[in-house]
């Protein structure tokens, strides 16, 4: 039987304990909070515990796991336990604890892990992973909590949509097979797609923005359910702290309603230098909305042209 090993990390946060706990307890928001989390959503609660489906980046791939959460708002603790952890782990669990302190609070993260057969190499790998996760998680939590009073200014959410006269499966196929976008979407000049699994992929695009500049974007994309594609951007411009999107397809009487939702978090410290010296946060928000919305609408239009044309078939006599 594998033995459990433990590691503890602590950090200080200049924010009220309840604010820090609130960020941790909002599990669907972990994709904004933690760099390695691509997407998180709750399954129905079981036995007094919250069951979370979690997609994370790991060693160039994507893990899809279930995590049981044990929230305790009165005690300011949040326990977690991975169900059926992937090798080399034979077990993984832990607890976040928030302790009031002068000027804010102390955050303690206890983690437990085990490797099949207590293999030394696997244990060393798991310990290194736990150390890296803790360091990244505490830094991200500290930054988010200390900026929480500005979240209304830096968080930008919006959606663009289009009605398409085609089957949802055809639209989904166009969106999922993004490796062909360089030939099908005008603002994309290069597309490199790596299939990690049938439900996860890595996508790298070179795109031309409305101002004529060219940017390379690198994203993880997963399919959490029918008619949905969720994406998290890995390579971010200086102005953004996070960028998440979701394509959702809803069948209608005439075909499908395709919606592209964006969630972006701006970096206030980068605003004065972008898009020009002395820029305001409002100007930066407008710039991001225009740039992302323009590419979304163009991709939706390209999807409509491609799939509606395919469903009508070639002209008669050809």
Image (spheres, helix red, strand yellow):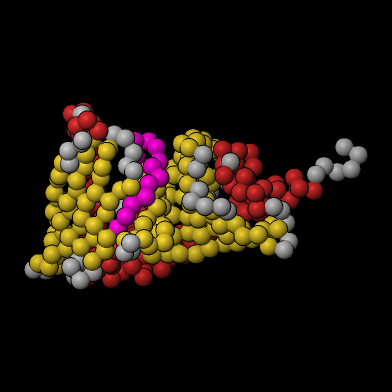
Give the percent coordinates (x, y) of residue 275: 41, 57
Residue 75: quadrant of the picture = bottom left
Q: Is the magenta stretch mostly helix, strand or loop?
A: strand
Name the quarter where the C terminus is drawn. top right
Which of the two residues, 243 or 65, is positioned nearer the viewer here? 65
Give the percent coordinates (x, y) of residue 316: 89, 43
Give the percent coordinates (x, y) of residue 293: 54, 59
Above or below, 283 against 296 in this view is below
**Which residue corresponds to the image point at 65% horizontal and 59% vertical from the top-left?**
251
Which of the two residues, 283 or 176, is positioned nearer the viewer here? 176
Counting labels gives 0
Q: Can residue 152 be seen in this view?
A: yes
61 in magenta: yes
**Which residue corresponds to the image point at 24% horizontal and 49% vertical from the top-left?**
93
What span is colored magenta in the figure? 58-69
Which of the two residues, 167 or 95, is positioned nearer the viewer here? 95
In the picture provided, is 254 more to the left or to the right than 257? right
Above or below, 311 against 198 in this view is below
Residue 99: quadrant of the picture = bottom left
Give the percent coordinates (x, y) of residue 155: 38, 65
Q: As drawn, which residue projects farthest toward the right?
A: 317
Q: Is residue 273 visible?
A: no
**Which residue corresponds to the image point at 14% horizontal and 45% vertical from the top-left?**
7
153 in magenta: no
In the picture provided, is 37 more to the left or to the right than 119? right
**Which residue corresponds to the image point at 13% horizontal and 54% vertical from the top-left?**
10
Name the quarter where the N terminus is drawn. top left
Which of the two residues, 265 or 216, is positioned nearer the viewer here? 265
């Amino acid at each position: 039987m594998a033995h459990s090993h433990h590691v503890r990390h602590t950090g200080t946060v200049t924010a009220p304990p309840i604010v820090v706990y609130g960020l941790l307890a909002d599990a669907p928001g972990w994709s904004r909070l933690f760099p390695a989390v691509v997407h998180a959503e709750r399954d129905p609660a079981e036995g007094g515990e919250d069951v979370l489906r979690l997609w994370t980046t790991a060693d160039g791939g994507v893990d899809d796991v279930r995590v049981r959460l044990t929230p305790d708002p009165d005690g300011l603790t949040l326990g977690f336990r991975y169900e059926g952890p992937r090798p080399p782990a034979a077990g993984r669990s832990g607890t976040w604890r928030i302790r009031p302190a002068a000027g804010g609070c102390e955050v303690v993260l206890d983690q437990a892990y085990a490797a099949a057969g207590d293999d030394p190499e696997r244990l060393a790998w798991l310990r290194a992973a736990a150390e890296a996760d803790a360091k990244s998680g505490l830094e991200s939590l500290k930054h988010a909590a200390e900026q929480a009073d500005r979240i209304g200014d830096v968080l930008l959410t919006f959606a663009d949509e289009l009605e398409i006269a085609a089957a949802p499966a055809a639209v989904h196929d166009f969106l999922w097979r993004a490796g062909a976008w360089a030939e099908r979407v005008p603002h994309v000049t290069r597309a490199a797609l790596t299939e990690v699994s049938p439900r996860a992929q890595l996508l790298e695009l070179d795109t031309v923005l409305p101002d004529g500049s060219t940017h390379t974007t690198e994203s993880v994309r997963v399919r959490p359910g029918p008619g949905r594609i969720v994406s998290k951007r890995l390579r971010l411009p200086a102005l953004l702290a996070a960028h998440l999107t979701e394509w959702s397809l809803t069948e209608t009487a005439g075909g499908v309603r395709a919606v592209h939702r964006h969630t972006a978090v701006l970096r206030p410290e980068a605003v004065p230098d972008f898009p020009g010296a002395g820029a305001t946060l409002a100007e930066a928000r407008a710039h991001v909305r225009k740039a992302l919305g323009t590419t979304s609408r163009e991709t939706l239009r390209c999807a409509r042209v491609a799939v509606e044309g395919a469903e009508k078939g070639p002209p008669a006599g050809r």
